[in-house]
Amino acid sequence: MSEAAQPLLEVNGLKKYFPIKSGLLSRTVGSVKAVDDISFSIKQGETFGLVGESGSGKSTVGRTILRLTDKTDGEVKFKGVDLYKLAPQELRQLRPKMQLIFQDPYSSLNPRVRIGDAIGEALLDHGLAPREEIRDRVMDVLAACGLSSYHIDRFPHEFSGGQRQRVGIARALVLNPDLIIADEPVSALDVSIQAQIINLFRKMQDTQGLTYLFISHDLSVVEHLCSHIGVMYLGSMMETASRGELFRNPLHPYTKALLSAVPIPIPKLKRERIVLSGELPNPANPPSGCKFHTRCPFAVARCREEAPLFRNVGNDHSVACHLV
Ligand code: SF4
């Protein structure tokens, strides 16, 4: 395989189960299968959008990839290196190359630390720049993220929501990463500010060749940025395809329902809205067979008994549904 075709990130059979404890002795009585055997890969310079309702496990995927929480099973490879086989010191050396951006960067900023110091401390921690160069490096990254030089001496509470997200992006970018995992990075922002931040993500990808795993509950946001999309439901991957293929030819009933809620800019092109009945089932006690069968308008008897295989149906399009 040529280097260009080599995935930057490979996730194979990843599982993350959280134990449920009960009783005085805190015995394990079950588990929440937050991530249940999912696989996907992202090539250098691509953006993979991971979508699904709140509680589908998509944020846990991001955290498990970065080893912020331990996996239960499976494999995560970054540039061909299995991250779970690295010693703590080796993982620490690799950390700057894989950065996480949160929905609300304010929660990760110390309110008493000036933004310039908050951004620069990561450079110092990892020994990536001498102290006398830090201020210039921070100024450069602030400018690249659309912030002004005077922001360097401001405190987090002096920034608007959109500016804080720019700070979050600057804090990740200053380390010169290859992979950014962005977890709902625009969900808390007004629509007009969302567009600005998405444009910033795009610009950074063009200028720095970044690769993104973009986690969102909103398919219309993912549509603007992602080249490939994976749809998760209750810890499982239901469908993956390129953006064009998924929007043109969605195969899984859950994807169809999510897509039916995405506004179409051309009013004449009406798409029938599919409203899912019921709530997301309890992940500690997921439905048997196909996890989606309790809400699927097309479910047949087999769906209640047998889980569908996640399989490639051609055109780099994979789906888990008995009817496809
Ligand atoms: Fe619906 Fe059955 Fe397909 Fe699951 S396997 S999505 S329940 S039709």
Image (cartoon, grey):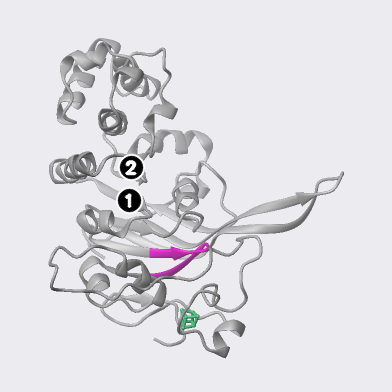
* Kind of element beneath mark 2: loop
The earlier-in-sequence mark between 2 and 1 is: 2
The stretch drawn in magenta includes residue 84? no
* Residue at numbered disc 2: 185
Q: Where residue 154 appears, x then y in whole percent? A: 28, 13
Q: Amino acid at mark 1?
A: Phe
Residue drawn at x 56%, y 89% is: 302
Mark 1, secondary structure of its residue: strand
Place of residue 239 in the rendered image (x, y in percent of width and height, measured from the top left): 38, 71
Taking the spot 50% from the left edge, 84% from the top edge, the residue there is: 299
User: What percent of the width, then of the height, locates residue 120?
Assistant: 31, 19
Q: Tell me what residue is drawn at x 41 percent, y 12 percent.
A: 112
| Numbered badge on residue 297 | none
Gap between marks 2 and 1 measured at Cα: 8 Å
Point out the stretch of residues depicted in magenta.
Answer: 231-239
Q: Are marks 2 and 1 in contact (CB under 8 Å)?
A: yes
Can you say whether 80 is above or below 245 in the image?
above
At label 1, counting other C-alpha atoms closer than 10 Å, the crowd grade (few under 14, some 14-19, many 20 or more) is many
Q: Is residue 120 above or below residue 65?
A: above
User: In the depicted view, which residue is nearer to us: 270 or 176?
Assistant: 270
The answer to which quarter of the image holds residue 167 is: top left
Instruction: Please state the horizontal and vertical placement of residue 142, each as a whole percent of the image.
Output: 20, 24
Q: Which residue is mark 1?
A: 214
Number of numbered labels in the structure image: 2
Please, what is the three-letter code of the amino acid marked with disc 2? Pro
Is 273 located above or below residue 5 in the figure? below
In the picture, which quadrant includes the C terminus? Answer: bottom left
**Residue in the image at 28% along x and 43% along y:** 178
Q: Residue furthest right?
A: 24
For the question of whether residue 7 can be seen, the reply is no
Answer left or right for 226 relative to 185.
left
